Image (cartoon, helix red, strand yellow):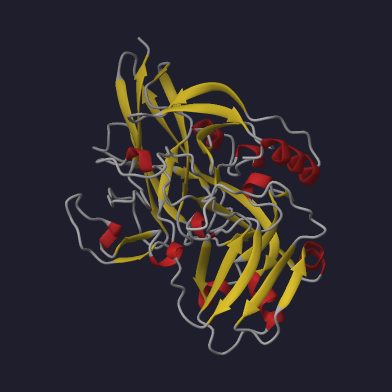
Amino acid sequence: MKRKHFLAASAAIAGSAVATPALAQSVTLPFDNGERALAAFPQKRQLIVLSSRPVQLETPAHVFDAGEFTPNDEFFVRWHLPDVPTHIDPSAFRVNVHGAVATPVTFGLDDLRSNFEAVEVNAVLECAGNSRGFSSPRVPGGQWANGAMGNAKWRGARLRDVLAKAKVGTGAVQVRFQGAERPALPTTPQFLKSLDLAVAVNPNVILAYQMNGSDLPVLNGYPLRLIVPGYFGTYWVKALTDIEVLTEPDQNYWMKTAYRVPNTPNYSVAPTDTGFATVPLTNLTVRSFITNFTDGAAIGAGRKTIRGIAFDGGTGIRSVEISSDGGTTWRPTDLGPDLGKFSFRRWTATFDAQAGQRYVIASRAVSNAGEGQVQRWNPSGYARNAVDNVSVSVNS
């Protein structure tokens, strides 16, 4: 990365002081080869570093216990290509809408803020490979633990309102998006993602210029990001510059080859399976996490509160259960406020910790659609939603 220019751009864009990414210390994630650096990048507190080119930063697990919404400076980062924007002039920034439309149009940030209704949606952004590091057998790809996700209040203009200004043609089938990131080599495919037209015109899909009440951080897609609630983060194109309406299904690499899963129940196959058909990965799976205990922790005896979060792909959470005996028996938890069907849902429960004992605490969620958590495996490690569990010992 051109660090000097990146730091200057960050300060100019965000209006805040930033510090040079600096190695502070390390952390060990709970799987083989889990040693990672912790570093503070521009506009970010210390995050777990998977790579710096492209930038991939994971949110530490303790952040999710602080509340339903993930702070901007602790929100995970995942770019696909190494050449990320290092300077953006917000006054000159434009997004072009073209293709199968009657009137190609170009919008600036002021246009989007002033000439379209501003809407807000609470939604979880999750990387398709979140928790990949726990796959067994191991699979290639970024070895994330459970921190390639976050929940935010996204504010912006509805995509369908922007498309309406361009007057989408009758033969349109998909809408394709491109951001400002670029490959290092000319042979590497540009990062392009497409949505079926029916998804693109859903009122929950927005072009966001704010995140948790502030401008987007540079590393999270400033100045404009596509928000597709309920879909995996690969569709949430950052630093959005181009919107193209298509009359044929997109055949680019990132749609036809990448981010695909087995066309099987739960996207699962055996590690020895080959030759299976695949489909594009789209909706999030139902998940729950324990947020106030870490695996291997020692705790005091007595009545303990267990806290956690749950979410799914857009129907909302029906229930969360916990087990303190490794899944032999289960009991219900108390759900917190419903902040929207795309948002984290908090839950709490209690259990009696007996001195000298060891407990395996697990949580499992069920969505309003009836989807539960399952043990799945595929060769890309996508859409993992196995039951989360932590082992704790009680001091004598």
In which quadrant of the rendered view does residue 246 lie? bottom right
Left or right of 74? Residue 109 is right
- Residue 310 in picture, x, y percent from top left: 46, 47
* Outermost residue, bottom side: 170
Total residue callouts: 0
- Residue 126 in picture, x, y percent from top left: 49, 50
Q: Mark yes or no: residue 277 visible.
A: yes
Q: Nearer the viewer, residue 54 or 137?
A: 54
* Outermost residue, top side: 396
Viewport quadrant of the N terminus: top right
In which quadrant of the rendered view does residue 2 lie? top right
Left or right of 91? Residue 234 is left
Query: Against 19, is 77 above or below?
Result: below
Left or right of 209? Residue 335 is left
In which quadrant of the rendered view does residue 264 lie? bottom left
Residue at left 37%, top 12%? 395
Viewport quadrant of the C terminus: top left
- Residue 148 in picture, x, y percent from top left: 49, 43
Q: Nearer the viewer, residue 201 or 297?
A: 201
Query: Against 345, is 245 above or below?
Result: below
